[in-house]
Image (cartoon, rainbow, N blue to C red):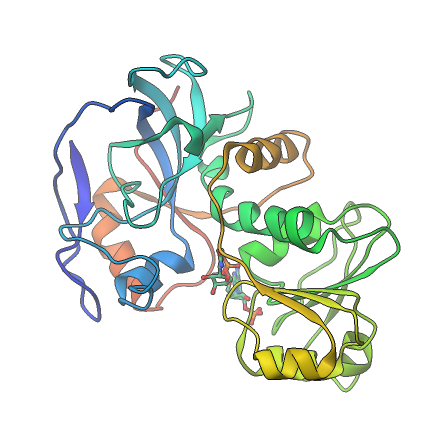
């Protein structure tokens, strides 16, 4: 099986196309013929060795966690998927494996892909929409009438959170480059350097922080006691959180079928619609991955293998 392989951590990962072992899925696992695989900021962080505390890599490593494809082999005791099912899913970051012709994952890490949901769009969902979903619905549980402030709203996670926010929630989206607002998921866009930003932040009942850094400190100092913050880039300073009387948690995406199914359903209903990705072919994956890891590209990138349903 052909795959993109790296032999060590960046700054210059030796990314090259090569051959990975063509193994059969074990008990509880499925093999997916990959149609599309998306890159996420996590892939760059993993390549730089920034996540070794959480996700230590073993080399050679096949990058990529988010994929869409077709089930082409079933391990023992997998009864809820069939050969030929179109799916989307996410592998454990330590395992990676999506930038390849095929990937083996536990069956709980995939869900069926609704009819009409294109593989290249489906592959954009698992990590960004998955963490947005878990932040909003498992952690923040944003109540009706609340003000939800999203930091780093111009990225894939922020965009998904705006679209998934429940009706009746007032969304304030903070980004360096404010985007146009979508009538189906309205948001008030603010820039972090606007004079209006902190007075607006002060009204937030819930904050989804997809930015970290200095803006996180400024917002913690501005929000009212009792506000809830879900950080996904860096944990909040504990002393500042206690001093302000807010509730804060650092979230790490849990790959679960219930989340995958919920976001696939939201995409099928048109609630979730990721920004159109820039698509590259498998043959271009080494160069594209190197550029992504080096921070030379912006926006969502998706590899397609050309094999349809
Ligand atoms: N804890 C977890 O489990 C978890 C899960 C997923 C992601 N994350 C982290 O969350 C952070 C955000 O992830 P992400 O997937 O949303 O990152 P992303 O899509 O790459 O966006 C990051 C930033 O890049 C800019 N950007 C993105 N698309 C753009 C475009 N088309 N045009 C212009 N600028 C664009 C935006 O900056 P501006 O604000 O300046 O416009 C955006 O805030 C990352 O650090 C990621 O690692 C954590």
Residue 26 seen? yes
Q: Nearer the viewer, residue 197 or 219?
A: 219
Residue 192 seen? no
Total numbered labels = 0
Q: Give x and y (percent) for residue 31.
A: 29, 25
Residue drawn 28% across the image and 56% down it: 289
Q: Give x and y (percent) for residue 75.
A: 29, 18
Classify the position of the C terminus by image quarter: top left
123 relative position to 15: left or right: right
Q: Quadrant of residue 84?
A: top left
Q: Nearer the viewer, residue 113 or 240?
A: 240
Residue drawn 29% across the image and 64% down it: 52
Residue drawn 24% across the image and 24% down it: 26
Residue 149, compared with residue 43, is above or below; it is below
Residue 282, compared with residue 286, is above or below; it is above
Q: Quadrant of residue 212?
A: bottom right
Residue drawn 84% across the image and 59% down it: 146
Classify the position of the N terminus by image quarter: top left
20 relative position to 281: left or right: left
Residue 274, compared with residue 108, is above or below; it is below
Q: Quadrant of residue 154?
A: bottom right
Q: Give x and y (percent) for residue 279.
A: 39, 45
């Amino acid at each position: 099986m052909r795959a993109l392989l790296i032999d060590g951590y960046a700054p210059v990962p030796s990314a090259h196309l090569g051959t990975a072992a063509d193994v059969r899925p074990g008990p509880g696992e499925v093999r997916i013929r990959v149609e599309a695989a998306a890159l996420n900021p996590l892939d760059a962080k993993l390549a730089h060795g920034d996540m070794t505390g959480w996700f230590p890599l073993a080399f050679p490593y096949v990058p990529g966690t988010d994929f869409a494809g077709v089930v082409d082999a079933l391990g023992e005791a997998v009864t809820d998927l069939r050969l030929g099912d179109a799916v989307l899913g996410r592998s454990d970051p330590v395992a990676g494996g999506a930038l390849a012709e095929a990937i083996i994952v536990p069956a709980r890490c995939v869900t069926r892909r609704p009819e009409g949901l294109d593989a290249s769009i489906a592959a954009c969902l698992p990590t960004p929409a998955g963490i947005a979903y878990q932040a909003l619905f498992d952690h923040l549980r944003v109540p009706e009438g609340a003000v939800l402030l999203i930091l780093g709203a111009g990225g894939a996670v922020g965009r998904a959170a705006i679209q998934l926010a429940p009706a009746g929630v007032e969304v304030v989206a903070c980004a360096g480059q404010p985007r146009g607002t979508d009538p189906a998921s309205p948001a008030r866009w603010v820039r972090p350097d606007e004079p209006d930003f902190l007075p607006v932040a002060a009204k937030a009942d819930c904050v989804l922080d997809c930015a970290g850094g200095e803006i996180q400190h400024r917002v913690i100092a501005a929000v009212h006691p009792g506000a809830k913050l879900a950080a996904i880039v860096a944990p909040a300073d504990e002393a500042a959180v206690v001093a302000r009387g807010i509730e804060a948690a650092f979230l790490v995406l849990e790959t679960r079928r219930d989340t995958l199914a919920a976001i696939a359903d939201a995409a099928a209903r048109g609630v979730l619609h990721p920004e159109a990705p820039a698509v590259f072919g498998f043959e271009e994956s080494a160069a594209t991955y190197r550029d992504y890891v080096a921070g030379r590209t912006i926006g969502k990138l998706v590899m397609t293998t050309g094999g349809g349903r």
